[in-house]
Image: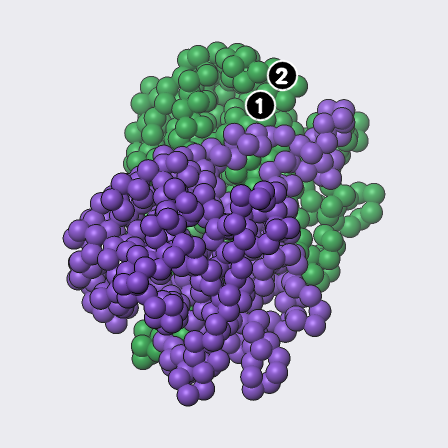
Chain colours: A green, B purple
């Protein structure tokens, strides 16, 4: 529970594109209006050059730190990294976090009202890309008066945005920190996403995307999340946490084993994680975002991977996680090896991909050292 | 295509349990009749002690080697390892392979006729376990006149049977070769199976298991297979094979990216693998077998893992695969370290779990050395 010492930061929403100045998307669509939900922590200096941009991952939001209300039970998704005296020290830096284009936490996306129909866009929303997300973030920092980003940081899909930034707006970027991410989304990761999308689309309650009046495709969307959860964690972390425990321990040996309602703890955990996402996220949005990830390829229309990553001149800290099966360390090392002014650092953790949200101490040390 | 030099081996079916002598299953059910489908390669010697038992994995069959007919286009699933001059040399050994209890390739299982109703058992089939499978294999080798098994070998679920054998029938076993397997099914692997089962059960065409008159739950069962395929391979092997290629290469840049019918090759591959299994396997059987895997735990009702694996006195060759994320090498090393008379060997491969079916040369060398 928040205490009196905890700060309340509300998410603000600003319109950054309108009919006269629509967002020109990579797919060719000109989109308007585009609203952006964002939060900031700390103060921007008069030169506008002490800003840090934090980019969230698949199901994240602008709410990266502090508490959204006095009643709020949980802090932002990277509260451990952002704040006074923390790695992204808000006494020094003006930290910006925004919900990316196509998200469902306040920024224009699939659940927003299509001005032409007065109904949610649903599947008529144009497919955004990571580059479109970055374009919108650029409009936001300009709106906020930022002249230079000290650094841009993010893990997973957040790291994909991080990598696009110095390629799209080199003059605005002083350094980058891509964490547990991909320069091109790998076929194994695409495979996971395509399976998650099928899980949603196979659900009759998805109704070809027109479920808004009826409720979410609960079973399919829950399954999509459960598939992803397995890729976010490692077999070692599951072993430590669940072993082979079942949810009922007061049964005789035969019923303990063969009563299927006596779930393994790991099954119960996956169901719970699936339900939790269904309760807080939107299924069509999930489809759009995973497609944006699959389309992510820094080399597209630019040249070879050597030339493209080789053209990034700002200092880069590339962070890998030793137990990450989704974006393995060999990908992070390759990114580090191709960006000329780059350092590689590795988080040691049994927790797999999600370790960038868990291993605060290791990541904080790396960030503090890099920002110095 | 088979040539004149290729041997034809037909799968035989024998009834091993009847109403007077039913199979007493671990769940308490007495099952009869029980038929077993099996193949043998080579000749049993007069002492009956030159036999090798090969145990198949999740979707396998008794057809482990040679060709099932002159028209057959593909050899058995381990044809590379079984035959004259091969690792399991049929000039010396009598190799036995059987479809395990609960399978859908000739041995009694969920698709078999329930004598009480005249219809397929479906979900009224009793839940078999790995120990039940081994009990039926024991009846088969006795029927065949085998007095001693030179070795028992298998990967994945096959390896689980291998580990149960010396614990259940120590007097019949001379050595074991568990490959890429588990002594207790891990929570991460249980997680994968529970997700695969949900994919099937979420499909309305599953009809709570009563789909026999209507056809398989195609989408859900295909999805279950696709989920499993990702765990059988590695990101490196997918990268080598698919990169980020799409199925249509004659489109302009915009349509190439944003036309969703222009699947990534890896998506197309996964769909193909899913369909292939739907065409050759049974969905309820898949549910039963994955449950049997999840229930697998050599320590159940026996004692600690140290005591149980420590009680195996026969020589063991435990084989791991360096890129296996499903049954990682640390599990194989633990098995090796706990079985007193054990050797550990590692297959080096980018292919992940499935490498035990792919890296013939490495495995053959290991097996030949061990059998000597």
SS label for mark 2: loop
Q: Residue furthest front?
A: B46
Residue ID at (32%, 65%): B146
Rendered location of residue A191, percent (x, y): 56, 42
Rendered location of residue B132, percent (x, y): 38, 71
Rendered location of residue B294, percent (x, y): 40, 62
Q: Is residue B325 left or right of residue B169?
A: right
Q: Nearer the viewer, residue B244 or B159?
A: B159
Q: Residues within 10 Å of mark 2 (few under 14, many from 20)?
A: few
| Residue A355 versus residue B189 in the image, above or below | above
Give the residue pinned by disc 2: A302
Q: Nearer the viewer, residue B100 or A351?
A: B100
Q: Chain of mark 2?
A: A
State if disc 2 and disc 1 touch (CB < 8 Å). yes
Question: How far apart are the two marked residues, 1 and 2, measured between alpha carbons?
Answer: 8 Å
Residue ID at (16%, 53%): B340
Q: Examine the rendering and report whether any part of residue B190 can be seen.
A: no
Q: Nearer the viewer, residue B86 or A317?
A: B86
Residue ID at (51%, 45%): B230
Residue ID at (47%, 75%): B15
Q: Is residue B57 left or right of residue B204?
A: left
| Residue A282 versus residue A294 in the image, above or below | below
| Residue B101 versus residue B320 in the image, above or below | below
| Residue B226 versus residue B297 in the image, above or below | above
Q: Nearer the viewer, residue A305 or A21?
A: A305
In the rendered structure, find residue A98 and report the number of the disc placed on it: none
Q: Quadrant of the C terminus of chain A?
A: top left
SS label for mark 1: loop
Q: Examine the rendering and report whether any part of residue B113 can be seen.
A: yes
Give the residue pinned by disc 1: A298
């Amino acid at each position: 529970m928040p205490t009196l010492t905890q700060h309340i930061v509300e998410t603000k929403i600003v319109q950054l594109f309108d009919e006269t100045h629509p967002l020109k998307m990579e797919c060719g669509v000109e989109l308007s209006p585009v609203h952006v939900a964002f939060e900031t922590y700390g103060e921007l200096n008069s030169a506008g050059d002490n800003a840090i941009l934090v980019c969230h991952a698949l199901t994240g939001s602008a709410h990266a730190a502090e508490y959204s209300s006095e009643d709020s039970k949980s802090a932002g998704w990277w509260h451990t990294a952002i704040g006074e005296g923390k790695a992204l020290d808000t006494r020094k830096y003006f930290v910006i976090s925004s919900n990316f284009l196509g998200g469902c936490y306040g920024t224009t996306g699939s659940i927003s009202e299509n001005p032409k129909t007065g109904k949610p866009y649903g599947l008529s929303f144009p497919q955004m890309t990571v580059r479109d997300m970055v374009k919108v973030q650029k409009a936001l920092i300009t709106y906020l008066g930022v002249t230079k980003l000290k650094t841009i940081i993010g893990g997973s899909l957040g790291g994909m945005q991080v990598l696009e930034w110095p390629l799209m707006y080199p003059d605005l970027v002083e350094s980058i920190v891509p964490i547990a991410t991909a320069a091109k989304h790998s076929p194994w990761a695409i495979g996971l996403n395509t399976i998650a999308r099928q899980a949603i689309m196979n659900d009759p309650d998805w109704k070809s995307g027109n479920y808004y009046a009826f409720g979410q495709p609960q079973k399919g969307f829950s399954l999509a999340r459960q598939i992803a959860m397995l890729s976010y964690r490692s077999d070692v972390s599951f072993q430590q946490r669940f072993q082979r425990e079942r949810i009922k321990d007061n049964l005789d040996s035969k019923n303990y084993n063969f009563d299927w309602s006596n779930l393994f703890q790991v099954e119960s955990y996956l169901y719970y994680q699936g339900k939790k996402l269904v309760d807080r996220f939107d299924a069509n949005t999930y489809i759009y975002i995973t497609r944006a990830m699959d389309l992510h390829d820094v080399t597209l229309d630019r040249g070879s991977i050597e030339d493209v990553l080789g053209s990034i001149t700002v200092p880069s800290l590339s962070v890998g996680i030793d137990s990450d099966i989704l974006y393995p360390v060999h990908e992070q090392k390759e990114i580090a090896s191709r960006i000329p002014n780059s350092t590689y650092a590795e988080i040691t953790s049994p927790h797999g991909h999600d370790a960038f949200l868990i291993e605060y101490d290791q990541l904080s040390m790396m960030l503090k050292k890099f920002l110095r």
